[in-house]
Image (cartoon, rainbow, N blue to C red):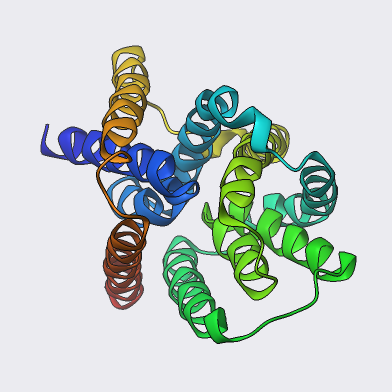
Amino acid sequence: MLTTGLVLGAVVMGAGMQRITGMGFALVAAPFLVLLLGPVEGVVLVNVCGAVTAGAIIFRVARDIDWKRYAALTASAVLGIVPAAFLIRLIPPAVLEISIGVILAVGLTVLLALKSATLPARRRYLLTAGGLSGFMNTAAGVGGPAVSMYSIATRWQHKSFAATMQPYFFTIGALSLASKALTAPATFPSLPVAMWAAVAGACLVGLVLGDVAARFVPARAAQILLIVLAYLGAAATIVRGVLDAVG
């Protein structure tokens, strides 16, 4: 019962952050869901909830979406999704847990470091970000850091970036789920129908709360909270992986 409550809490928190910041679900929820459900099942649930959450937001931000950048990111992400779908069948759970935590922590650190750097908005950087994002989304449930690095380094206007990320996350989430269904169907979490319904409800609650909070929470404060929670979750996931490896 405690685990169920924590899972739903993580989903609510992630969906709320997704609404406030444009890309918060995986960064916030992934570490905790991996910690609670395991490295494979947790990532699958992140893919499901991330796609549902992003899909629900698309209609609210459609006018600000940069469809050309979305198309380029999505096409390159496919190249990263395919190898990652096979990778999750080969790596031991403890190693995968540690890798997920390290990938997230390193991604966030690089993201913060890049705030002082500026890159030209060239197509090759966009395609590289999409490929890395697709790989990380499938293998670790965190497709955001790679595209965030690109947006910050190239000074992509935040309103357009946040809007464009919604159809992008919806698409790569759906593609990641499809690839796993074909290559590793056993990785899907065995949750009762009532639990899936509760997760869907948690996504909705998180979006509603995030919609309300977005009117009052300064963007800077939301970003700081997002980073702190993600670092804590990444650290907890690494610790669990280390304990599993030595135990």
Which residue is found at the position 19% from the left and 41% from the top? 6
**Which quadrant: the C terminus?**
bottom left
Residue at 46 percent across and 42 percent down: it is 46
Residue 131 percent location from the top left of the image: 77, 60
Q: Position of residue 183 (x, y in %)?
A: 71, 40
On-image quarter of the N terminus: top left
Occupied quadrant, residue 228: bottom left
The residue lying furthest to the left in this view is 2
Q: Is residue 139 above or below residue 241?
A: above
Give coordinates of residue 47: x percent, y percent.
53, 39
In the rendered image, the vertical position of residue 77 relative to residue 124, given as above or below: above
Give residue 144's position: percent from left, percent from top.
56, 57
Name the side, left or right, on which 21 lies relative to 238. Answer: right
**Which residue occupies 53% across, 75% down?**
111
Quarter of the image holding residue 123? bottom right
Is residue 232 toward the left or the right of residue 191 in the image? left
Q: Nearer the viewer, residue 192 or 158?
A: 158
Tell me what residue is drawn at x 60 percent, y 52 percent. Answer: 137
